[in-house]
Amino acid sequence: GAVVSQHPSWVICKSGTSVKIECRSLDFQATTMFWYRQFPKQSLMLMATSNEGSKATYEQGVEKDKFLINHASLTLSTLTVTSAHPEDSSFYICSATQGLNEKLFFGSGTQLSVL
Amino acid sequence: GENVGLHLPTLSVQEGDNSIINCAYSNSASDYFIWYKQESGKGPQFIIDIRSNMDKRQGQRVTVLLNKTVKHLSLQIAATQPGDSAVYFCAENYGANSKLTFGKGITLSVRP
């Protein structure tokens, strides 16, 4: 199946710093990428939908200035958690698809811990 | 919508037995359903999918059943193995936008 690479797999940062997470589709062009957040023992919650070359669409309650998403190419989307605080500590997961109603392929996730 | 409770329900099965994992989905207009497996610290892994024009689909050792009347989805795993231990999520999609809504998840624990 298609491969989605997410980097880093884990990151520890100090409160107030910004963290960038990368999501790459390695063997296909991803017109759409999605970013999810997952707290321990809970399900995946969609944060935003990212389409190549356009602004991301954020779900209700997700601060777009807090979670900056860039999808500058068909193989790369980035999520930047700005001015991270301990409550932003979570498992962040990206997924990518080649097109509408196509299968989604997930990255391996990034565990963010903010001290 | 999803239950965001603190503890996922757990299904414990004996190695070699068949497992049945159930999911109640939320949107009667959803037309595409997927089962994912998630191991600790990893992203979800695709298991099997089914579209709303079908009620059953089989894969290797897995079968998905869809009952649209009661908005129920199930995953059957034959001859459950220790490597099947993980959290299982159902997901639904409505419309051609690939935007998935995930269910709350169930932990499958396989006893050796």
Image: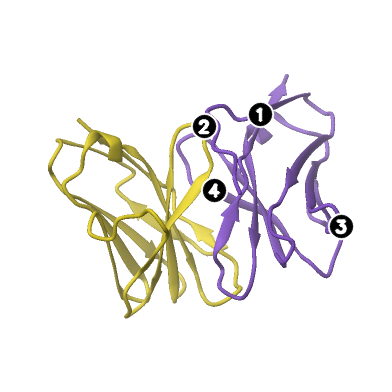
Chain colours: A yellow, B purple
Q: For the residues marked 4 and 1, what is the alpha-carbon distance in whole angstroms?
A: 18 Å
Few, some or many residues within 10 Å of mark 2 (<14, 14–19, 20+): some
Q: From the viewer's perspective, is residue B29 above or below residue B66?
A: below
List the residue tagged with mark 4.
Answer: B44
Q: Are marks 2 and 4 on the same chain?
A: no
Dot 2 falls on which chain? A
User: Residue at horizontal 16%, vertical 47%?
Assistant: A83
List the residue tagged with mark 1.
Answer: B9
- Where residue B80 sits in the image (x, y, percent)? 77, 33
Residue mark closest to the camera, 1 vs 3 = 3
First-in-chain label (3 vs 4): 4
Which amino acid is tagged 3?
Thr
Left/right placement of residue B30 relative to residue B100 reads right
Q: Name the element at disc 2.
A: loop
Q: Name the element at disc 1.
A: loop
Q: Residue furthest bottom?
A: A53
Report if the CB atoms under discs 4 and 1 are less than 8 Å apart.
no
Which amino acid is tagged 1?
Pro
